[in-house]
């Protein structure tokens, strides 16, 4: 069984997220999503989510491409997650290109193109108008 992992906040879930998850799942048999906790988002990214962690987790768990959702609590956990879950492929959007190349010692690292016309930041900006 080929295992894939991706990380993210997945706030204001939209079709760009779904496309990323679908393409990630196509790279293996089992997709794990490490979902940023509210504390990690605020303390490390100064990002406040619209939906709390448990609601974002429930949304992700309802997507057919997602097999398991785990908490992302810090930047450093990626190597231990890859080892613990015996990950074959690490997937992120290409806006993170090169940032996780250090994982190539442990698994394949793939950066997928983002859906260009949609982003959570843009949705929040548009709603604020």
Image (cartoon, helix red, strand yellow):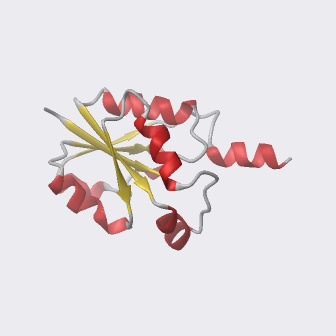
List the single residue furthest toward the bottom.
43
Residue located at (82% from left, 49% from top): 128
Q: Is residue 58 above or below residue 15?
A: below
Image location of residue 91, percent across then percent down: 34, 43
Image location of residue 104, percent across then percent down: 21, 52
Image location of residue 85, percent across then percent down: 18, 50
Residue located at (62% from left, 41% from top): 119
Residue located at (79% from left, 44% from top): 127
Labels in figure, total: 0
Image location of residue 90, percent across then percent down: 28, 45
Q: On the picture, is 126 further left or further right than 30?
A: right
Residue located at (19% from left, 46% from top): 87
Q: Is residue 126 above or below residue 82?
A: above
Q: Is residue 53 above or below residue 44?
A: above
**Residue in front for this viewpoint, 69 or 81:** 69
**Residue in front for this viewpoint, 48 or 26:** 48
**Residue in front for this viewpoint, 93 or 125:** 125
Quadrant, the N terminus: top left
């Amino acid at each position: 069984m080929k295992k894939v992992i991706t990380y993210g906040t997945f706030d204001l879930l939209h079709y760009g997220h779904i496309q990323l998850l679908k393409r990630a799942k196509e790279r293996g048999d089992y997709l794990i999503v490490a979902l940023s906790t509210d504390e990690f988002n605020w303390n490390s990214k100064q990002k406040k989510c619209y939906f709390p962690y448990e609601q974002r987790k429930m949304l992700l768990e309802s997507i057919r491409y997602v097999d398991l959702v785990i908490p992302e609590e810090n930047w450093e956990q990626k190597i231990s997650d890859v080892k613990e879950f015996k990950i074959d492929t690490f997937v992120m959007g290409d806006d993170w290109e090169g940032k996780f190349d250090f994982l190539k010692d442990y698994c394949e690292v793939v950066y997928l193109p983002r859906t260009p016309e949609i982003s959570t930041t843009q949705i929040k900006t548009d709603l604020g108008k």
